[in-house]
Image: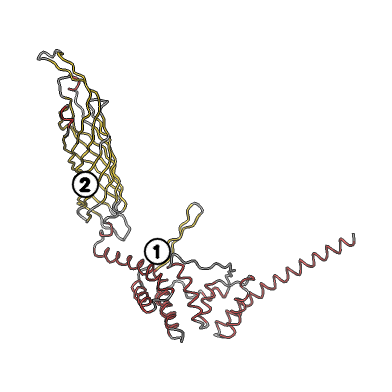
Amino acid sequence: MKKLMCFLLVVLATFSLAAESKISKKEMYLRARDVLRESLQNQETEKAQEALEYLQANVDKGAPLIRFEEYLILMEIGRFEEGVKLYSGFRRMILDSGYTLQKDFRVSENDGLNQYLYRNLSPFTKAKADSLADRVDSSDINQEFKDLYRTLIYSELVVGVQTYNFNGRSFAFTVISDTTCAEDFLNNAKNFVKNYPLSEHSLYLKEQAIPFVQNYMDKQRLFRKDPWAHKYYTGGLAVFAGKWLGFMSGELMDLVNDKMGTSFIIEGEIQYKRVSLGLFWSFGLINEPKGGNSYYHNESEDESMGITLGVTAFDTKYLKVTPFVGISEYIFMEADDWYAHPFIFGFNIDSRVFATRPDRIGALSFALNVRFKYMAQIGSITDSYTTNVYDEDHVLIDVKKGNFDKSFASHTFALELGISLW
């Protein structure tokens, strides 16, 4: 029993010493951060460097010092080359889609040092960016680092990251956060690529960052010149309704007569870039088998419905031309067993008679459209048929039966009115 008690006391003493050791280390780290803050405030560079180096040496052991704090400290004490190298890694993560910064798990601390380092960074303006870049320019480090830093510090004012959360997962997208310094960034980035073509930073600046910002700025200039121009060949949603005229042609006309009845067509359309997917439903053409059977005197319009795939060939504010192909179901209403699945081709000519002015790129615009449509439905009907022949007194004198396989083409010329979310 005494041995057991002694063992327990030894174990408790061991845990106690370990806890005290852990607490003392944390206190030492926090004290080093306090010394570092005071040294920076008093511009005691050597003392600040000692405190920084102590924290850097113990980062793996839990010393609180995140990378961005380390960058800010390096810039404060004038170790600009190290600071620029560290900062370039942060910005490259944003500007280079193929780059990943090596992960290290660092402890953060919201204390006096953290508040001191971030004191002038929010909001981050061009004046502050210029001040930081000018300070580096006045140093004696290599000119390449000076040019790189000014380029990247301007990029921070232009290119940022927007994060979306969906179903418990986060997705980050590179976005243009502000255009105030876009031209400054582009000029500095292009000069950097020109002057330092072998730099590891020139490749992603040339192939990714510069085109990303340049394309956006080109769109902004085009938008100011013509607010609708960025919407051409982009698409949207639209619905149309109208009247049409048409006729049938082909071998089927040996068996039927056609004429226009009361016509109507309605269609919906969704477009992405140049490609549009359309659905339509229409009726209006009357087809009557040749002969005198009174059954067919009860006239009703044929019905057609189908799906089309179009590609916009021409698009401006006032005129849009879209050829299309597709497939439909054509129902001859006079005989329930007469139907076909013809192939479709044709074109739409849309005139935007009115469109609301978008207030920015990406904003929605409503448009009122007038559409002219030509559509040909080409197919064939295979079926059996019966022809009844009557004399002048409407007495049945002959019944003819047979089979047929007849091709046909239905031609539609429509004029429609529509609205679109553009």
87 lies above or below 409? below
Check whether the beta carbons of the residues at disc 1 and disc 2 lie within 8 A of each other.
no
Upstream in sequence: badge 1 or badge 2: 1
Q: Quadrant of residue 105?
A: bottom right
Q: Is 410 rendered above or below residue 417?
A: above
Q: Residues within 10 Å of mark 2 (few under 14, many from 20)?
A: some
Q: Which of the two marks, 1 or 2, is nearer to us in this view?
A: 2
Residue found at x 20% / y 40%: 376
- Distance of label 1 from label 2 (alpha carbons): 36 Å
Mark 2: amino acid: Asn
Q: How many marks?
A: 2
Q: Tell me the SS state at disc 2.
A: strand
Q: Looking at the image, which is closer to me, 61 or 102?
A: 102
203 or 300: which is nearer to us? 203
Mark 1 secondary-structure assignment: strand
Image quadrant in which the N terminus is located: bottom right
Location of residue 18 in the rendering, given as x and y in whole percent from the top left corner = 74, 69
Q: In the visual, does 370 lie left or right of 138?
A: left
In screen coordinates, is 122 left or right of 310? Answer: right
Q: Nearer the viewer, residue 80 or 224?
A: 80
In this view, the residue farthest toward the right is 2
Q: Position of residue 248 (x, y in %)?
A: 17, 34
**What residue sits right under mark 2 in the picture?**
348
Residue beneath the point at 18% across and 16% down: 399
Write down the residue under mark 1.
175
Residue at far left of view: 392
Dot 1, crowdedness within 10 Å: few (<14), some or many (≥20)?
some
